[in-house]
Image (cartoon, grey):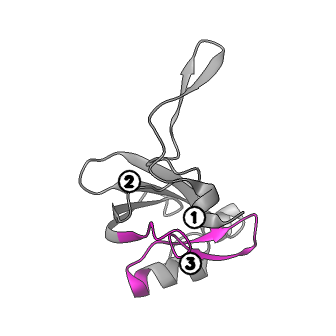
Amino acid sequence: MIELDFEKTGGLLPAICQDAETGEVLMLAFMNKESWEKTLETGMATYWSRSRQELWTKGLTSGNVQKVKEIRVDCDDDTILLKVEQIGGAACHTGHRSCFHKLVEGDKLTVVGEPVFDPKEVYKK
């Protein structure tokens, strides 16, 4: 088993998620040891939800799952890069393809791109 340095950062490692084909950064999430092992076991991106305090397999609710194509780890073994096939078109819970859909322009943020889905419809909240 691959051993990452979860202790250095209090049990959670940042996980950068990138489109395997285009290189677009889709999101940043966190992984604990359990989500790391589940990702390795299933080939589906599984994170630790800091807000819900539970494992979170990306896309189980929305259908926008992330099939892991390649995994890289940084030089200190404390940051993960997942290269994924983003199935369903959107990585962000707001319905946008990428969580990085806000452009800094001077002293304001401008949303770029249109949502792929309506979160109110998908999450029924």
Q: Position of residue 4 (x, y in %)?
A: 52, 72
Mark 1 lies on residue: 122
Q: Of circles 2 and 1, which is in front?
A: 1
Circle 3 crowding by C-alpha within 10 Å: few under 14, some 14–19, many from 20: many
For this rendering, which residue is in front, 76 or 62? 62
Give the residue drawn at x 30%, y 47%. Answer: 23
Q: Which mark is residue 72?
A: none
Of callouts 2 and 1, the N-terminal one: 2
Give the residue drawn at x 41%, y 47%. Answer: 25
| Amino acid type for the residue under numbered disc 1 | Val
| Amino acid type for the residue under numbered disc 2 | Gln
Q: Is residue 105 left or right of residue 54?
A: left
Q: Is residue 16 magenta?
A: no
Q: Is residue 1 visible?
A: no
| Amino acid type for the residue under numbered disc 3 | Ser
- Residue at the far left: name it: 21
Q: In this picture, is 9 found above or below 27?
A: below
Q: Is residue 47 magenta?
A: yes
Q: Is residue 68 left or right of residue 12?
A: left
Q: In this picture, is 37 found above or below 45?
A: below
- How far apart, in angstroms, are the residues tagged by discs 2 and 1? 23 Å
Give the residue drawn at x 35%, y 71%. Answer: 68
Q: Secondary structure at mark 3?
A: helix
Give the residue drawn at x 51%, y 70%. Answer: 58
Of callouts 3 and 1, the N-terminal one: 3
Mark 2 lies on residue: 18
Q: Of circles 3 and 1, which is in front?
A: 1
Q: Which residues are magenta?
A: 40-67
Residues under numbered marks 2 and 3 in contact, where contact means CB atoms less than 8 Å apart? no
Mark 3 lies on residue: 35
Quadrant in the picture for the N terminus: bottom left
